[in-house]
Image (tube, grey):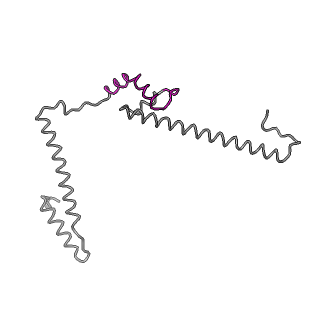
Amino acid sequence: MNDDYVDPNESEGMKNMRKQLKEQGKQIKEYQDQLNQFQSQNRGSVISQALSSRGLDPQVGKFYPTDLGTDDESVGKWCDENKDLFRSAQAENTPQDDRGTLSETERRGYQAMQDMEAYDARVVQDFKSQIDQIKYDPTNPDKAEAELLALLSANGVNLASM
C-alpha cells in the first residue's frame, strides 16, 4: 500500500495519526541505528578486554567470529582453540633484548652511559633551579645580571667566547 495515498474521506484526526506514525517510524529507525552502533562498540570493547586479560594483543579481536558470544567462556574457548596461532604470531613480533647478547664489559659500559644520562639530567635540573632563584629587581637590574654571570662562570661557562 502506498504511504502517500490520501483518502479524501479521511478525517483530520486520522491524517494527524498517520503523520505521527510516520514520525515515530523514523525515530524508531534512528534509535535502532544508535543501538546497533552501541552494541558493536560494546562488543569490540568486551572482546578486547577479554583478549588483553589473556595476554593477547587486543587487535586479534578483529578475527573473532561474529556468530560467537562475547561472554568470557566463549572468548576463552575460542582463544584455547587458536592458541597455537597466537603464540607463533607473538613469537615473531616479540623484539629481542639486545642486552642479553652483550658481554659483561659491554653491559657495564651500557649501564655507565645510562648513569651518565641520569647524572646529566640532575645537573641540568640543579642548574635550572639555581637560575630560577636569581631575582630580578627593577630598581637594580645590574644585580641580577651579575648574579647570572657569576653562576655561569662558576659552572664552567666560558663567557669570553659568547
Estimate the x, y position of residue 122 in percent, counting from the top left.
Answer: 19, 53
Quarter of the image that includes the C terminus: bottom left
> From this viewpoint, which residue is outermost toward the left?
105
Residue at the location (82% across, 38% down)? 5
Quarter of the image that includes the N terminus: top right
| Relative side of 91 to 105, left or right | right
Estimate the x, y position of residue 113 in percent, counting from the top left.
Answer: 16, 43
Task: Tell me the chief SS of the magenta region.
Answer: helix
Q: Is residue 13 magenta?
A: no
The part of the chain drawn in magenta is 65-92
> From this viewpoint, which residue is outermost toward the front?
73
Q: Is residue 77 magenta?
A: yes
Residue 20 occupies quadrant: top right
Q: Nearer the viewer, residue 96 or 135?
A: 96
Estimate the x, y position of residue 121 in percent, counting from the top left.
Answer: 20, 51
Q: Nearer the viewer, residue 69 or 14?
A: 69
| Relative side of 105 to 23, left or right | left
> From this viewpoint, which residue is outermost toward the right?
9
| Relative side of 109 to 37, left or right | left
Residue at the location (24% across, 74% down)? 137
> From this viewpoint, which residue is outermost toward the bottom?
139
| Relative side of 9 to 140, left or right | right
Estimate the x, y position of residue 63 in percent, counting from the top left.
Answer: 45, 27
Residue at the location (10% across, 35% down)? 105
Residue at the location (79% across, 47% down)? 16
